[in-house]
Image (cartoon, coloured by chain):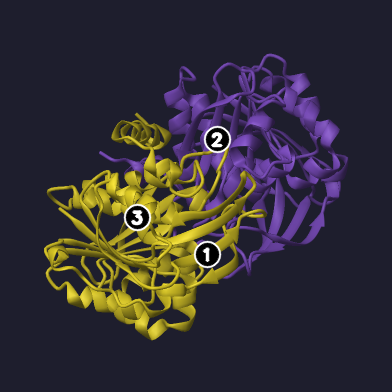
Chain colours: A yellow, B purple
């Protein structure tokens, strides 16, 4: 089944201990789409500027990603510049230029309206809400957010959370959102805000899935996916969005959303995240095969399985 | 097969968000022995003072732990006072009194000499080395250390590492010992110092086992054990030593040290660590049954297994 994703398509200038790249194709919706495209059909809603040309377009086309919902606006695309020189787990932002993104009004092509899966990547919760409301027929809605929205746009974010089935955030965001340092209690508090499933990403330590059995916010089931021990992380940018793409893409490819499907989705999330960081920007995701994904999925299984 | 362990038997005064306890029975050798005693015979080498009486002795006897090697010396037992008020992952030490431990000269009872497994808990590497050299017939030697020895007693520690089959340390210690922030590279560097197996404990994120396939220090195999998501940690003291006791105790109980035995040992380590933190001091380990251990082991399997 197809996924519609709304989020940023952008240019990133990135510096890591492995080097520096200027104006890579980036943005949460880009990483998400590429990762999810190995599992199911993906349709993107975003806005780009006049600097987005056929070369960038072809990155999406090569993976059969529907770009009808990528609006071209006068001006420049969203631009981010950051480095990971001291800490590979956290980017230091040097510059953010919203450009055409500042006036982004998501428009949903008619052909997207039969999507059964919707992913609200990290953007203004007001826009997330608007897209969610415009697609009442979807079967499963997942979303992401970040510290900025949690701290300064809490009421709007709480409205979004009410309409989410699955929230994907990291440790720091979960603790901040819940106001509780204990991750299990934080998970319970966040699930009481709406989502029945919560994925908390722990960076190099993998990710946890919390699921409420009854829908009343009790964190009654937990599952853990490891991260691959990597001796070189070239560029952490997009790891979380690639995790989300693998996770949600795999779920959308399944005939039924069984507990087993969620468990395998967590491992596919870790798998896609581990590929994303191996090269700068989206390079690795662009040159990936489904066989390589299956091989790595099996390596992840080996990493934690007793038998 | 039996394990001989050398390390501290001590009193701890502990403050955590769950409360405060004065002069609990503690020490690395105590936690290690109690945890390992559920899997195999354990013999302790330590020194205690005149404040160690029949009540403390009975804690070991109740678990059939051999205390012949616990020397009684004039004076007081080792005493530690610490708190975990701001951070459950790291103790703040308020007071350390070495007392009889300052002049500790490990003496190995003749009846211990046929032990095939030796655990060198966190003590002065000079003493670890002495005990290791005095038991040349052992089949497998594991050990622990801490930042203090890594920073200020490196040459003595490096001598100990040459004689270890397995080293168990935490993230910070591994990075400090190797001088490398990337855990995979740090693991490779530490294994080049001697141990063919390295367990790195990640606190609430579980633990990783690195094993060199060829013995030349290449980190060619990795395994990950999760930690149980706990909504209340009453007292983190002894979690790492209880992990080591479960891990090494299980290994000592196995007819062969297969890769599968190491994997299960990692899960038993996590299992024993998760029990230790549920109550103050050694309370939970004293009141544990083998059935409870098997139940939790299965819960850990559920936590990461796909099928």
> In the displayed structure, would residue A195 be above or below residue B162?
below
Label 2: which secondary element: loop
Residue B196 location (% of width, % of height): 62, 23
> In the displayed structure, would residue A14 be above or below residue A187?
above
Residue A172 location (% of width, % of height): 51, 66
Q: Which mark is residue A32?
A: 3
Q: Callout 1 environment at 10 Å: few (<14), some (14 to 19), or many (20+)?
A: many
Q: Quadrant of residue B151?
A: top right
In this rendering, position of residue A121 left or right of residue A203: left
- Asked if the residues shown at circle 1 and circle 3 are in contact, with their CB atoms under 8 angstroms apart, the answer is no
Residue drawn at (84%, 46%), measured in percent from left and top? B100
- Which of the two residues, A75 or B142, is positioned nearer the viewer here? A75
Are discs 2 and 3 located on one and the same chain?
no
**Residue receiving disc 1:** A80
Q: Quadrant of the N terminus of chain B?
A: top right
Give the chain of mark 3.
A
Q: Quadrant of residue A267?
A: top left
Residue drawn at (12%, 48%), measured in percent from left and top? A255
Residue drawn at (28%, 69%), measured in percent from left and top? A195
Mark 1 or mark 3, whichever is nearer to me: 1
- Which of the two residues, B289 or B171, is positioned nearer the viewer here? B171
Q: Quadrant of the C terminus of chain B?
A: top left
Examine the rendering and report whether any part of residue A27 can be seen.
yes
């Amino acid at each position: 089944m197809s996924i519609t994703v709304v989020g940023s398509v952008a240019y990133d200038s990135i510096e890591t201990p492995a080097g520096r790249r200027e104006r890579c194709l980036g943005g949460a919706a880009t990483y998400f789409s590429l990762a999810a495209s190995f599992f199911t059909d993906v349709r993107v809603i975003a806005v780009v500027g006049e600097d987005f040309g056929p070369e960038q377009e072809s990155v999406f086309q090569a993976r059969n990603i529907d770009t009808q919902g990528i609006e071209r606006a006068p001006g420049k695309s969203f631009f981010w510049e950051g480095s990971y020189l001291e800490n590979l787990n956290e980017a230091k932002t040097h510059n953010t230029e919203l450009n055409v993104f500042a006036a982004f009004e998501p428009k949903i092509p008619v052909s997207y309206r039969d999507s059964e899966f919707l992913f609200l990547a990290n953007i203004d919760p007001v826009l997330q809400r608007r897209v969610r409301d415009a697609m009442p027929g979807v079967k499963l809605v997942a979303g992401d957010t970040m510290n900025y929205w949690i701290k300064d746009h809490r009421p709007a974010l709480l409205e979004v959370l009410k309409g989410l089935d699955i929230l994907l955030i990291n440790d720091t965001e979960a603790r901040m959102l819940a106001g509780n340092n204990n991750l299990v209690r934080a998970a319970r508090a966040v699930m009481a805000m709406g989502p029945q499933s919560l994925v908390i990403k722990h960076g190099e330590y993998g990710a946890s899935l919390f699921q409420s059995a009854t829908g009343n916010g009790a964190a009654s089931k937990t599952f853990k996916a490891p991260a691959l021990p990597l001796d070189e992380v070239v560029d952490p940018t997009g790891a979380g969005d690639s995790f989300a793409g693998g996770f949600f893409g795999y779920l959308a490819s399944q005939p039924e959303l069984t507990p087993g499907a969620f468990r395998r989705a967590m491992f596919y999330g870790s798998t896609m995240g581990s590929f994303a960081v191996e090269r700068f920007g989206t390079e690795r995701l662009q040159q990936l095969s489904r066989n390589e994904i299956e091989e790595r999925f099996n390596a992840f299984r080996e990493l934690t399985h007793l038998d």
